[in-house]
Image (cartoon, rainbow, N blue to C red):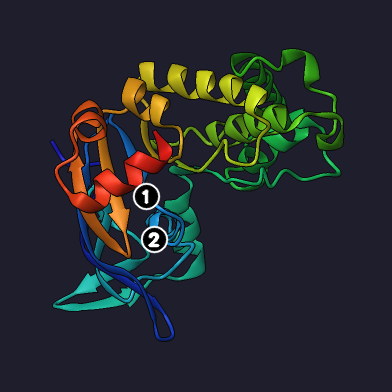
Amino acid sequence: MNAMVKAEGVHKSYGAAHILKGIDLEVAPREVFCLIGPSGSGKSTFLRCINHLEQINAGRLYVDGELVGYRQQGNKLYELKDSEVARNRRDIGMVFQRFNLFPHMTALANVMEAPVQVKGESKAVARERARKLLDRVGLADKADNYPSQLSGGQQQRVAIARALAMEPKLMLFDEPTSALDPELVGDVLDVMRDLAEEGMTMIVVTHEMGFAREVGDSIVFMDQGVVVESGHPREVLTNPQHDRTKAFLSKVL
């Protein structure tokens, strides 16, 4: 079975700052894959490379067997046109730390927007799916509310529904609960748990160690742009092998 995501020697630099230093990892279909580590370790940058929001400087990244952002001829890589990148990106849902909802649109309109604009779906079809998705994330009664009328947790659940509206085969979550008040975190994690149970392939950058332990199938600890340790979450979190992992977990657990 093909990996859903495969990274081979991925490097990313911003000028002299070398952010990713040769990342190798695989994410299987239906897997919940958690990325943990200190701020600045490259986790979010790696996530953004998976859907080509950031270009990599070396290595290869594949999603569902296809190169991300490039095509290969011989040994050379050629960057795809923006329209081709956008087509690839349709299959990848992304949920950001800051919800990035359109403030002038209702929750329902936010969820409908991409299927109508990107896939050319009829408004009637998109509206029906958007209502079902808002119901699925527990917000059926908030369809006509604007983002400013919603709590942070509700906005994040709308953002998840919006990503799901494109029927992605992979969901990327970039610290989806870190901007939320503590009492609102649980509702968002519950939606993510449900997605995991339904078999959605997910890569989650998170500080929620309880979620990683309960829901994750694999966990990777990153530091300074490299994978320091990886394995099953219960193993890594309760019995880390590397001193750097032990030091990090002693501060967050």
User: 68 and 96: which one is in front?
Assistant: 96
Q: Position of residue 190 (x, y in %)?
A: 52, 18
| Residue type for callout 1 | Gly
Q: Residue shown at 35%/71% (left/top)?
A: 56
Determine the secondary structure under disc 2: loop
Whether residue 73 is visible: yes
Q: Are marks 1 and 2 in contact (CB under 8 Å)?
A: yes
Whether residue 5 is visible: no
**How many residues crowd mark 2 within 10 Å: few (<14), some (14–19), many (20+)?**
many
Res 212 quadrant in image: top left
**Disc 2 designates what residue?**
42
- 21 versus 135 height, above or below: below
**How many residues crowd mark 1 within 10 Å: few (<14), some (14–19), many (20+)?**
many
User: 33 and 30: which one is in front?
Assistant: 33
- 219 versus 161 height, above or below: below
Res 60 quadrant in image: bottom left
Q: Residue shown at 75%/28% (left/top)?
A: 108
**Disc 1 designates what residue?**
37
Determine the secondary structure under disc 1: loop
Q: Which mark is residue 76?
A: none
Q: Position of residue 104 (x, y in %)?
A: 86, 44
- 217 versus 25 height, above or below: above
